[in-house]
Amino acid sequence: MSNPPAGHVARSTIRPNAETPGGTPGRASRRTPARTFLRTSDGVRIDAAYRPGATDADAADLVFVVAHGFTGDADRPHVRRIAEAFARHGAVVTFSFRGHGASGGRSTVGDREVLDLAAAVTWARGFGYARVVTVGFSMGGSVVLRHAALYADDREAGTDAVVSVSAPARWYYRGTAPMRRLHWLVMRPAGRLVGRYGMRTRIHFVPRIAPRPLLVVHGDRDGYFPLDHPRMLAEAAGDHGELWVEPGMGHAEHASGEELLHRIGAWAVARAG
């Protein structure tokens, strides 16, 4: 299905908490954490959080937008751990995809989630950073690829570099037991809409990301998607793509160690923009 551009984000609604009492998103100081709800172009409320980078990261003038995997959300410990690691290299925006955490709507397993990411990127740019890097894990890894292609000409909602970790080259894949269980979950009667929209091939979007830098990261012990997936993505990316096959690494956020996260952060600082 086609996705209308997220383009502009409506005025955000603050959700005060211990970190951001009375803060103002978008127009706040870069040094002030913020928590808010964004509204996507199709009207879904998305829970999002902004974390300033470490003081020595300000020179990078860069903000990471982290796209979590299926069943994750912005408050999950593994997502917060990733935000903490990237904060050593720049500012960080995390958010919960539709149907996850405090966000509204229902999951479409990677289809309309591209609108959620576009809203988060637009909000991140509102803090005035010169460069935005999207980093996605598993389902989020497929979303950052599609987003970069669909918003390639949109300076406000688009990205400057892309990192896709443990992403599928094709969502309909059922060659492993975890993916068969996932398909069973989303294709039950309550999830048929999800199955209809979410289980589509994604690889044809990858060539459209150029000339933006693209990093594909995958573990050689990924239990969901074997190595033909990242290799297909890297091949489709051509000269502008880079593939890291990580020895001993499993799947997505939980398998991403601190050393790998800091290596990704350094790559983003060097390659974005």
Image (cartoon, rainbow, N blue to C red):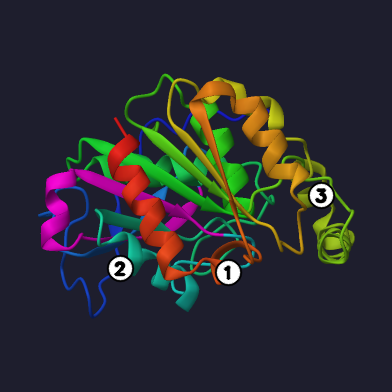
Left or right: 19 as drawn, with respect to 101: left
Please, what is the three-letter code of the amino acid marked with disc 1?
Answer: Ala
Q: Position of residue 196 (x, y in %)?
A: 82, 43
Query: Are the two marked residues, 1 and 2, in contact with CB atoms closer than 8 angstroms?
Result: no
Vertical order, 145 against 251 (above or below): above
Vertical order, 77 against 25 (above or below): below
Q: How many marks?
A: 3
Please, what is the three-letter code of the amino acid marked with disc 3?
Answer: Gly
Residue 225 in magenta stretch = no
Please, what is the three-letter code of the amino acid marked with disc 2?
Answer: Arg
Tag in front: 3 or 2: 3
Q: Mark 3 vs mark 2: which is more N-terminal?
A: 2
- Which quadrant of the rendered structure holds the C terminus? top left
Quadrant in the picture for residue 203: top right
Left or right: 216 as drawn, with respect to 19: right
Q: Which residue is mark 1?
A: 255
The kind of secondary structure element at disc 2 is loop
Vertical order, 153 against 213 (above or below): above
Q: Which residue is mark 2?
A: 15
| Magenta-highlighted residues | 44-68
Residue 31 visible in the current orientation: no
The span from disc 3 to disc 1 (Cα, nearest Å) is 26 Å
The span from disc 3 to disc 2 (Cα, nearest Å) is 32 Å
Q: Which residue is mark 3?
A: 195
Q: Residue at x 49, y 73 (%)?
A: 78
Query: Are the two marked residues, 3 and 1, in contact with CB atoms closer than 8 angstroms?
Result: no
Quadrant in the picture for residue 253: bottom right
Q: Residue at x 51, y 67 (%)?
A: 73
